[in-house]
Image (spheres, grey):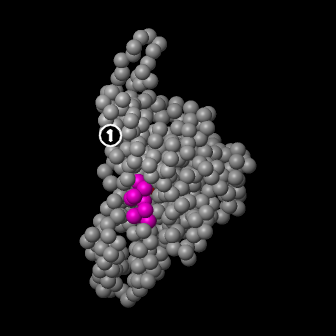
Amino acid sequence: MNIETRLVQIGVGREETTGAISYPVFNATAYRHPAPGESTGFDYTRTANPTRTVLEEAVADLEGGDAAFACASGMAAIQTIMGLFSQGDHLVVSLDLYGGTYRLFEQILSRFGVSFTYADMRDIEQVRLAIRPETKAVFVETPTNPLMQVADLAAIARVAKEHQLLTIVDNTFMTPYFQRPLELGADLIVHSATKYLGGHNDVLAGLVVTKGQELSEKLRLLHNSIGAVLGPQDCWLLIRGLKTLALRMERHQANALSVARFLQDHPGVSEVFYPGLPDHPSYEVQQRQASGFSGMVSFRVKHAAQVPEFLRSLKLISFAESLGGVESLCTYPSTQTHADIPEEVREKVGVCDRLLRLSVGIEHPDDLTADLAQALEASVVKGGVRA
Ligand code: PLP
């Protein structure tokens, strides 16, 4: 069945007692056992919950995985995966990366003796060179947050397999609607489901998807033991959001392309980063490994002095720190999402003080470009700079 249909039908036909089309929220934390040694399949909600099971089975199916685990946030999902590693282990990680992931690795996991090397994943030689005898996994974000750099997933998974490493992919920006990394050789997927999967800026959630029985059982143990699981109400919100994922992603993408083209032609803008623009350096890789380009666009204004007035002047687009919802948001990575990355590292990667990130929503594209036009105009005039 096609993905659009599978998305809409999540949970339908699963509640046999009443036939409810929308699968109910099971708030119960405990379940009666029919007899000693017997179970309905549900004993205690941290281990398994019926609403969560419907969500997890659906996401495993969408990603082409064997199991999925719903977590309290994207960071909880990443931390759950990190439970696979021990003191002395090393991971190779995308150089351009969500700041919270960098913070977890550098400020917390490093204290437990796990170390990380950051490599530009567009360059497969850099990945090879970063691998050490104690390396256990490659952690890839693609496209990266916020610079939209694209890694060739099949090539990275091949190198990882040669060295018996796990390939972990953060698929938050693409969702399984556009990109399915397990089909390209990855072993584990992580999502901030707070973003496109939920889609409405109203639920904090994360997901891990695994391939293979052994890995699935290891993650099942970690998920239940760490306990950073998603509550049933939030599972329901996520199921509700997923039903419209296909429609939303198509519209996010069409709007993002309009916005990217508009920004490219604007004299107040120096660079636009959107993998759906044919002159993006990774346009072909992206076309090969995914069926779309999603709705995230980053750009640099010409002068840092434009930024405060630009953000103050936005009316329709909210200056806010998230992405993937139906409402358009604009983020300033250097003081928001990436503030915990040291300035010299940020500058080296390209997350400079002229960089802005747009999560393009599903409003009418003309209204979005009109808002950007007036805010850019104000940024040039009131920012006191010549475009
Ligand atoms: N991964 C990516 C690519 C993100 O953008 C984020 C959050 O912005 C996360 C992971 C963390 O997700 P959460 O905020 O749901 O914990």
Where residue 269 appears, as percent x and y from the top left, is 42, 80
The stretch drawn in magenta includes residue 186: no
Q: Which residue appears farthest toward the right when viewing the image?
A: 162
Quadrant of the drawing holding the C terminus: bottom left
Q: Quadrant of residue 329?
A: bottom left
Residue at the image point whose x is 35% and y is 64% from the top: 362
Residue at the image point whose x is 73% and y is 49% from the top: 162
Magenta range is 245-253
Image side of residue 263 versus residue 133, left or right: left
Nearer to the camera, 50 or 81: 50
Label 1, residues with CA under 10 Å away: few <14, some 14-19, many ≥20: some
Image side of residue 226 versus residue 158, left or right: left
Q: Which residue appears farthest toward the left when viewing the image?
A: 315
Where residue 376 appears, as percent x and y from the top left, is 34, 80
Q: Secondary structure at mark 1?
A: loop
Where residue 81 appears, as percent x and y from the top left, is 53, 41
User: Above or below — where is 94 with respect to 133?
Assistant: below
Nearer to the camera, 176 or 3: 3
Residue at the image point whose x is 33% and y is 80% from the top: 373
User: Above or below — where is 34 with respect to 334?
Assistant: above
Dominant secondary structure (helix, strand or loop) of the stretch shown in magenta: helix
Q: Quadrant of residue 377?
A: bottom left
> Three-letter amino acid code at disc 1?
Ser
Where residue 102 appears, as percent x and y from the top left, is 50, 54
Q: Is residue 12 visible?
A: yes
The stretch drawn in magenta includes residue 252: yes
Nearer to the camera, 243 or 53: 243
User: Above or below — where is 2 with respect to 285?
Assistant: above
The residue beneath circle 1 is 22
Q: Which residue appears farthest toward the top when viewing the image?
A: 36
